[in-house]
Image: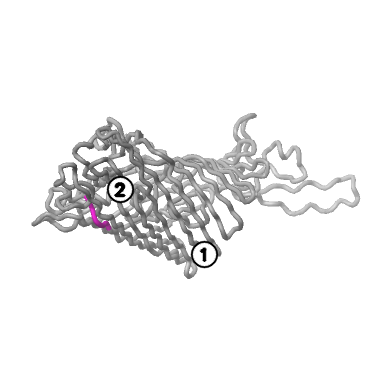
């Protein structure tokens, strides 16, 4: 997109282009809208003057783009009006808490729920600039899925609090790239290379704001270094925010702690107290190798190392334990417009990266740490036909049993033992399909679309008491009307 500021025209007037609007001195200049530009006049005193060329039409530009100095800034995001219906009263808002679907033997299992919400609306800014041969991107994105504090959002004015999703800066010069800030974890599958941009990250096309059962993801602060030996191969390493997690987030189960060490929950290990007070030993170390044979074929290998530490005040002992996992992900356009996706993850102590549906570890009676096996898959097809996108996915999580005896030698503790709570799940599954249809789209004014999704989710606990349901099922329907802001980043030079 070619855009010239008024000051630049004075310096290189031979181009004969002029902006349609100019901001006051020192302020941002709004990028000019598309308008015809007269050609420079010929020199009347020169007998050899050539005829003027035909008028040149400037390239179309979004009226929402700004330019401050050399920095190009575009607003990003969309406005959502979402309706969600479930045949179980999961009480989880517009996102599904996959680990806590109600059973049929409780009241919530016999009640449906219906909600309207604007919370998935998303706003942010992207800034691009070239400095000393490096291309710099600053990216900010937030939604309205934060906590509401003391406001009852269902009684008064729907005081939905903003929530920071992404806030990072990325610098690329030649074959090297450095990122710092809050971004999608490098463990989240990519669609292209190891790019942090949301369009290059796979988090599905679903309306469910908790995405998919089995998807490895989180958004958290960290630092990454990426090397691009070629456009086809990318290698990256990352240090990301650690968190010793024993369950409790978004309806997920918690482990059964030793009776003498119950105080470790919430102080040394996160049990959904929503306070960052866990005594983490090291960052989470992540590495990823991605292959993009063409823009149609993406294949990647990813690995993570995690380290856990605690202190047993009763026995005056300190324990450490390493955990980790690996992923193999494939995203291939098999024929024009149709993509096949398969993301697969195995781990010892990686449950936090599965939307926290599985705890990371258990604690034995002496305070020693044992990671829980957590494996997953997400597979699907995305098909684009003109203005219509169709998607279908299947996802599954499998959580391993990990048990021990308490100090009395008879009571069981950990995860998945006989007699454990029916929220200590063995498996969770989801089948979902949907459509995203563009009603209209204009480069300068944005686009309007509707999205519909059907979701069937289920879970099975490790222990089922006599006469109790062996599984819980939930059917969910989403209908969404979305206005997407216009704007496109400048070309990378």
Q: Which residues are magenta?
A: 424-428
- Residue drawn at (48%, 51%), measured in percent from left and top? 287
Q: Percent from the top left, x then y, of residue 189?
A: 44, 55
User: Which of 23/266 is in front?
Assistant: 266
* Residue 25 appears in the figure: yes
Residue located beneath label 2 in the image: 370
Q: Quadrant of residue 141?
A: top left
Identify the element where label 1 is drawn. Answer: loop
Whether residue 426 is in magenta: the answer is yes
Q: Percent from the top left, x then y, of residue 400?
A: 27, 55
User: Which of 361/319 is in front?
Assistant: 319
The image shows residue 205, relative to residue 61, as above or below, that is below
| Residue most extreme to the right | 47
Residue located beneath label 1 in the image: 296
Dot 2 or dot 1, earlier in sequence: 1
Label 1 CA crowd tier, 10 Å (few <14, some 14–19, many 20+): some
The image shows residue 338, relative to residue 309, as above or below, that is below
């Amino acid at each position: 997109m070619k855009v010239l500021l008024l000051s630049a025209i004075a310096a290189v007037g031979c181009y004969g282009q002029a902006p349609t609007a100019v901001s006051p001195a020192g302020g941002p200049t709004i990028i000019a809208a598309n308008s015809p530009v007269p050609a420079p006049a010929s020199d009347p005193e020169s007998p050899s003057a050539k005829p003027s060329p035909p008028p040149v039409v400037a390239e179309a530009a979004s009226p929402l783009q700004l330019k401050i100095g050399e920095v190009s800034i575009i607003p990003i995001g969309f406005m959502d009006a979402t309706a969600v219906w479930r045949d179980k009263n999961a009480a989880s808002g517009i996102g599904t808490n996959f680990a806590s679907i109600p059973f049929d033997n409780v009241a919530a299992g016999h009640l449906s729920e219906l909600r309207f919400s604007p919370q998935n609306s998303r706003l942010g800014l992207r800034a691009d600039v070239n400095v000393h041969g490096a291309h710099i991107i600053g990216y900010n994105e937030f939604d309205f899925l934060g906590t509401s504090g003391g406001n009852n959002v269902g009684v008064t004015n729907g005081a939905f609090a903003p929530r920071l999703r992404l806030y990072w800066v990325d610098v690329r010069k030649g074959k090297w790239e450095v990122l710092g800030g809050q971004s999608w974890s490098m463990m989240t599958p990519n669609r292209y290379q190891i790019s942090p941009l949301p369009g290059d990250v796979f988090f599905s096309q679903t309306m469910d704001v908790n995405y998919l059962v089995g998807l490895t993801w989180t958004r958290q602060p960290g630092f990454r270094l990426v090397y691009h030996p070629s456009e086809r191969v990318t290698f990256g390493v990352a240090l990301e925010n650690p968190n010793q997690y024993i369950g409790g987030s978004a309806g997920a189960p918690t482990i059964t702690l030793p009776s003498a060490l119950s105080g470790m929950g919430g102080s040394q290990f996160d049990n959904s107290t929503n306070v960052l007070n866990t005594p983490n030993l090291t960052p989470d170390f992540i590495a990823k190798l991605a292959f993009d044979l063409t823009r149609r074929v993406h294949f990647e290998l990813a690995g993570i190392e995690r380290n856990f530490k605690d202190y047993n005040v009763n026995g005056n002992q300190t324990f450490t334990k390493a955990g980790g996992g690996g992923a193999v992900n494939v995203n291939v356009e098999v024929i024009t417009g149709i993509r096949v996706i398969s993301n697969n993850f195995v781990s010892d102590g990686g449950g936090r990266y599965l939307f926290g549906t599985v705890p990371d570890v258990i604690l034995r009676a002496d305070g020693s740490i044992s990671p829980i096996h957590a494996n997953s898959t997400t597979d699907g097809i995305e098909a684009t036909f003109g203005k219509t996108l169709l998607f279908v996915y299947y996802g599954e999580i499998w959580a391993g049993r990990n048990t021990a005896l308490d100090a009395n030698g008879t009571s069981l503790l950990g995860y998945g033992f006989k007699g454990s709570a029916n929220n200590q799940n063995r498996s969770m599954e989801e089948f979902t399909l949907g459509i995203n249809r563009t009603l209209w789209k204009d480069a300068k004014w944005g686009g309007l679309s509707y999205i519909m999704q059907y979701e069937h989710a289920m879970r099975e606990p490790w222990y089922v008491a006599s006469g109790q349901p062996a599984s819980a099922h939930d059917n969910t329907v989403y209908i969404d009307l979305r206005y997407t802001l216009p704007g496109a980043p400048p070309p990378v030079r």
